Amino acid sequence: MARILLLFVDGIGMAPAGSDNPLSTVEMPVMRRLLGGPLTTEQILLRDGLLLLSITASLGVPGLPQSGTGQTALFTGENGAVLLGHHVPAFPGPTLRRLIAEHSVFKRVVEAGRRAAFANPLPEDYVAAVEKGERRGSVTTWAAIAGGASVRRGLDDLRRGEAVAWDIVRDHFAERIGAPLPPVSPEEAGRHLAAVAARNDFTAWETFLTDLAAHGRWGLRVDDALARLDGLLGGLLEAAPADLTILLTSDHGNLEDATRRTHTSNPVPLLAAGPLAARFADLASILDLTPRILELLGVGRTAK
Ligand SMILES: [Zn+2]
């Protein structure tokens, strides 16, 4: 049986290697070993069980791609940017939330009788506040809510090593939620993620460390964000079950251009490692990902 794990890494685009591209200047030994070089356009490849290509995040709408519409595209396959006529940053408004409520990849997988998991912890009080409109929810939060309780993980799951926080080692996450959490190494977090993915047909995990660091927010550093991601990838690859295909992609460029702190119009990477990797080789856009995941999991199309 095919299993798929999607690593959504916010704000990393595909560009050539160079002194202004941290994806090529920061040490990422696991990524280099996997691809034979850095996560840059020079490494585009397809071979047995491994694929790297560039896919567009433009959504066919002018302007720099943004998180709200980009993540809606990734987690639903629906083009909210065309519907609204523009890209939407950060938190989705009513139109995007309607799309997510109907087309969430988690919801589709669960409704087909398969197991889906959002591997990031969503504290119960946070979910309740988002549902009541007291807190703003990200696309993934709304997509996980649409999937129902079986999709979500909480803080107890995180403490048991059955979830992975967006910052990987839990220091920033613990500070944001105002509760102490036992720290983990990036490699250990990667093994936790492999264990969640091994128990589900479809698992997604997100980190926005990369986008925040590239924007220069919260004092986060780009080299630290990439080192954490690389360590997580190391633990994950080492512990991944043989039937798991790991996907890594993004919603828009940002981090790959150190000369500016805004998003970029670069395409984003689609990295696939595992038995189904070649089945993603014809994808062109971030809109294509969810439909292909559903197809490979044998989940039918939405009746319209
Ligand atoms: Zn983003």
Image (cartoon, rainbow, N blue to C red):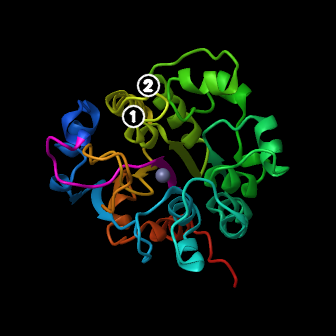
Q: Which residues are magenta?
A: 1-21
- In the picture, residue 186 is in which quadrant? top left
Residue found 36% across the figure and 27% down from its top = 224
Tell whether label 1 touches label 2 (CB within 8 Å): yes
Residue 194 forms part of the magenta stretch: no
Q: Is residue 298 left or right of residue 244?
A: right
- The label number, if any, that marks residue 186 in the structure image: 2
Total residue callouts: 2
The disc, 2 or 1, on the residue closer to the chain's N-terminal end is 2
Residue found 65% across the figure and 57% down from its top = 106
Residue at label 1?
229
In the displayed structure, 35 sits above or below 231; it is: below
In the displayed structure, 267 sits above or below 244; it is: below
Disc 2 under 8 Å from ligand 1? The reply is no
Q: Is residue 259 left or right of residue 97?
A: left
Asked whether residue 160 is in view, the answer is no
What is the secondary structure assignment of the residue under circle 1?
helix
Q: Looking at the magenta stretch, what is its main secondary structure? A: loop
